Amino acid sequence: QVQLVESGGGLVQAGGSLRLSCAASGSILSINSMGWYRQAPGKQRELVAHITSGGSTNYADSVKGRFTISRDNAKNTGYLQMNSLKPEDTAVYYCNTKGVTKGFVGFGSWGQGTQVTVSS
């Protein structure tokens, strides 16, 4: 089993910054991709940013130029640096990873979510 633990959420004023972390643990052989999603009250969960094992990234239009996704393969940890935060960024942010276990079984895991609240 693979577990994800997210951290770094909180309350910040508009224009501020936060850095989210997503640490994966368990019987991991490799992590192929990591993604950050968010879900605001009454809205569907949406993809915010995604990074492949090779480092290719893509972002939702609403966060381009403000958010940066990165990963530390040695630590099985992903990050989401969020700058110039806006009230509309307020949501629960979830980490998702896809990879292969040491038993050569593919996995996909979700974190428990971390709340990000941006005040105006």
Image (cartoon, grey):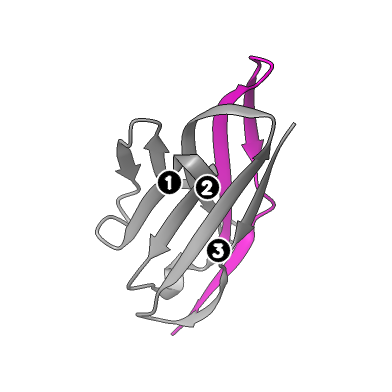
Mark-to-mark CA distance, 3 and 2: 21 Å
Residue for point 49% across, 48% down: 78
Q: In the image, residue 71 lies at what x, y percent?
A: 43, 46
Q: Quadrant of the C terminus?
A: bottom left
Q: Which quadrant of the figure has residue 51?
A: top left
- Which amino acid is tagged 2? Thr
**Mark 1 crowdedness (10 Å alpha carbons): few <14, some 14-19, many ≥20:** many
Tell me which secondary structure the magenta stretch mostly adopts: strand
Q: In the image, residue 47 lies at what x, y percent?
A: 46, 45
Residue for point 52% across, 47% down: 77
| Residue 43 in view here | no
Q: Which residues are magenta?
A: 92-120
**Residue furthest toward the top?**
104
Q: In the image, residue 93 lies at what x, y percent?
A: 56, 57
Q: Which quadrant of the figure has residue 66?
A: bottom left
73 sits left or right of 102 in the view: left
Is residue 104 depicted above or below 115 in this figure?
Answer: above
Q: Which residue is mark 2?
A: 77
Nearest to N terminus: mark 3 or mark 2:
2
Q: Which quadrant of the figure has residue 54?
A: top left
Instruction: Work out whether residue 111 or residue 24 is closer to the camera in this orientation and state it.
Output: 24
Residue for point 51% across, 68% down: 90
Q: Is there CB contact under 8 Å for labels 1 and 2?
A: yes
**Magenta span contains residue 112:** yes
Nearest to N terminus: mark 3 or mark 1:
1
- Which amino acid is tagged 1? Arg
103 sits left or right of 12 in the view: right
Q: Which residue is mark 1?
A: 71
Q: Which residue is mark 3?
A: 91
- Disc 3 is placed on an element classified as strand
Q: In the image, residue 16 lies at what x, y percent?
A: 39, 79
Mark-to-mark CA distance, 1 and 2: 6 Å
